[in-house]
């Protein structure tokens, strides 16, 4: 199993980040392959409404979103650390991962 810790808090050493890191350690101890994404460290621009993604399946903005999307959609990864409360969580991550979250609720931490 692959587990990715998605940390949305601006404080890399904050409570949410600490909890995510501890969960990743526990997952790794159980044999999972783990990685961490620190969202505030990524450059993600606002959607320009060009609809290029509808035609090509990829966002054409010169930012980190497309790589983030590919990382989270590849294989079976389980996001951690309260992203639903953030703007990115509500409007980007939750809709993008909604189906995966629904399918794997029992595997979520």
Image (tube, grey):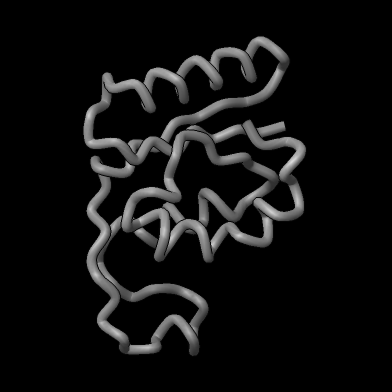
Q: Residue furthest top?
A: 29
Q: Which residue corresponds to the image point at 44% horizontal and 39% vertical from the top-left?
A: 82
Q: Residue furthest front?
A: 85
| 82 versus 15 height, above or below | below
Q: Which residue corresponds to the image point at 27% horizontal and 19% vertical from the top-left?
A: 13
62, 28: nearer the viewer: 28
Q: Is residue 20 left or right of residue 32?
A: left
Q: Which residue corresponds to the image point at 24% horizontal and 70% vertical from the top-left?
A: 46
Image location of residue 7, percent across then percent down:
38, 35
Q: Quadrant of residue 40?
A: top left
Q: Quadrant of residue 61?
A: bottom left
The quadrant in which the N terminus is found is: top right
Q: Is residue 18 left or right of residue 97?
A: left
Image location of residue 16, percent across then percent down:
38, 27
35, 22: nearer the viewer: 22
The quadrant in which the C terminus is found is: top right
Give the mark count.
0
Image location of residue 70, percent across then percent down:
51, 56
| 83 versus 23 height, above or below | below
Q: Which residue corresponds to the image point at 39% horizontal and 73% vertical from the top-left?
A: 59
Q: Is residue 15 left or right of residue 28?
A: left
| 46 versus 42 height, above or below | below
Image location of residue 36, percent across then percent down:
44, 31
60, 98: nearer the viewer: 98
């Amino acid at each position: 199993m692959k587990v990715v810790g998605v940390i949305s808090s601006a404080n890399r050493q904050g409570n949410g980040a600490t909890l995510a890191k501890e969960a990743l350690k526990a997952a790794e101890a159980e044999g999972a392959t783990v990685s961490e994404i620190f969202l505030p460290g990524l450059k993600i621009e606002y959607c320009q409404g060009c609809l290029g993604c509808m035609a090509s399946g990829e966002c054409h903005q010169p930012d980190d979103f497309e790589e983030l999307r590919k990382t989270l959609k590849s294989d079976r990864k389980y996001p951690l650390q309260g992203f639903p409360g953030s703007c990115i969580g509500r409007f980007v991550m939750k809709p993008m991962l909604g189906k995966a979250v629904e399918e794997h609720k029992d595997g979520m931490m």
